Amino acid sequence: MSAAQPFDHVEPRDHTLDACFLGPYGENDTLLEKMMVEFLRDHVYWRRNFHPEDPPAIATAAAHHPDYLAFESRMRRELHQLSAALKKSVPFHSPRYIGHMASDLLLPGLAAQMLTLPYNPNNVSEDAAPVTVDMEVQAGLQLARMLGYPHDPAQEACAFGHLTSGGTLANYQALRLALALKAFPVALRAAGVPELALPADDWAAFNLAPADAIALLQAWQHWLAAQAPAQRAHWLQRVERERIEQRGLAGFFAVHPQLRVPLVLAPVTAHYSWSKGLKLLGLGRDQLELLPTDGMRLDPAALRATLERCARERQPVLMCVAVLGGTEYGTIDPIDAVLAARQVSRASGLDFAVHVDAAWGGYLATLFRHEDGSLRTREEVAADYVQFPTPAVHAAFAALGDTDSATVDPHKLGYLPYGSGAFICRDHRAMALLAERADYVFHATTPAGYLARYRSLGQFIPEGSKSGAAAAAVYVTHKVLPLDHAHFGALPRATVRAAETFHARAQRFALELADDVHALVPFAPDSNLVCLALNPCGNTSVAAANAFVRELHDSLRCDPRQPLQTKEFFGSVTSLRPDMLGPAQTSRIFAALGLDPASLDPDEDRLLILRHTLMNPYLIDHENGISYIDRYFDFLARRVHALHAGAESHP
């Protein structure tokens, strides 16, 4: 199929998607402009009718004063310069952009955020944001439902979620909560609280299952509430003094010498934010143990062996992280196998939290949810695709609801403005351990009831001041496009289909250019991110292959020194390292590419590959019969031929 020919088969169009975005050509400019003018006028009417008896504070004649005009002139000049400079920005909106994890923005979220900005709500508490704080809590419940967590506030063990600036801060919140919950039973023992069924020793207390630790927290709260005021104050102070949050890491482990600082286990594919989080929390980078992978997916056998070693050495584990859509390769870890490994580990007295870093792949969960929130079978999901989802991928998504917490980024596959990440925990009751009091912001008593409790969000989250406009964008988008396969799922469905098309086209590309270059998709895509490894025929050197890919990438990356229009397509690069791949995968990939692993040296210890994020819903342009995927591979073929010809002319 050439780019100029119409498609042989055109599927029935869902024109709902045509209204979702501003569009690659700005096709929906009238819709966005109409909404923004309408709601800007509505905002002005609100101001004018707040107390209509108050006269205008700015005189009508002020607009004609020289000072006013001079200020307007300066403002216009700077805004024009800003507008001109922004034309050098990355064209995320275009189907020619297949680089990093960004695309066009959903109109409901963009409009909701722009609409809310003039009100400037601060989601630290309902005193500063009476509307958008509630929206943020509701958005957390929307995401919890998507993941399969309990999401009815009437349930005692309902989930809770809040927004963050991004996945990094959400991962940090997961560490904070896991550590607080793990250490609290130890504090109860140290304080000598009577009448509670406390674990026999510190090791057992430090290894309670998260659900059991929450039950003990609930028992403590109920016991405390039943005490007389003086006794309540005494025991509250006594327990608080023993908590890890009060003593600090050094003090806590000094008074509990039989305990060691816990490890965090994560696959080698884990995002670098986990290293940052451990440093921020004071646990230290040494406590992050990276586990081997099998095909860039966490190796369950390696996890089980590590847990057996930890139990044998009485080395506590704080958390095991599973990645749902790695940011480099889009692979899905076997979450079901991680949960099974924890279940086995419990028999040896070793327990820990399971967190899912779904910053990238979280919204793919919409593909697995019926409109009533129930799980779709693999057969139901697979009917829309060629190969997706594999049994392993379906099992991973089916297991999400049994994990303890998750990170999801609405500003990635949620198609919303930066920065809106999200942290969601399965049982909100654990959040009491993160509560902070500040009298000038929060009321003295925490109100009863789920929604009322979290209206003072600042007590529970890492940030202080935070944007309520971002919360409005997330909440409104989820209302317009509910998080199930029939609504929001239309977006990831289009992109996963595009990934399957891209994968098939990459295989054809490899055959077509077999005389010039070895081309390989190193891992079949689990999601909508596809990598491509390339090596010129006849070359066995990793350094030369990397130089070749760098030259290709030079034609695919943004260069602010040149007009954007000089670039036909935009892509990104990542790398494959033998220490991440393992011997078997390294041998397979290097052999397929004709590379000699012995050519690796300390300065060139990785293989560069092209990385393509296929989240633009217009990669297949049905309206005009254009496949930008075909056009990309045609472009790539021209570049490969040009580089190959250049190499032959300069041996």
Image (cartoon, rainbow, N blue to C red):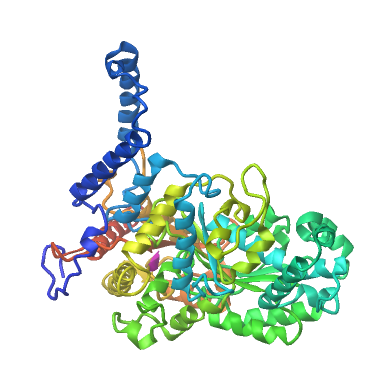
Does residue 615 appear in the picture of this structure? no
| Picture coordinates of residue 299, whole percent (x, y) | 58, 79
Assign the C terminus to one quadrant of the image. Answer: bottom left
Q: Main secondary structure of the magenta part?
A: strand
- Please state which of residues 194 and 519 is positioned toward the viewer in this rendering: 194
| Picture coordinates of residue 223, whole percent (x, y) | 77, 71
| Picture coordinates of residue 81, whole percent (x, y) | 33, 29
Does residue 35 appear in the picture of this structure? yes
- Please state which of residues 169 and 401 is positioned toward the viewer in this rendering: 401
Give the residue furthest to the top.
Answer: 66
Assign the N terminus to one quadrant of the image. Answer: bottom left
| 468 horizontally vs 618: left or right | right
| 574 horizontally vs 444: left or right | left
Q: Which residues are magenta?
A: 529-535
Give the residue furthest to the front.
Answer: 53
| 373 horizontally vs 340: left or right | left
Residue 75 quadrant: top left
Magenta highlight on residue 526: no
In the rendered image, the vertical position of residue 117 relative to residue 445, given as above or below = above
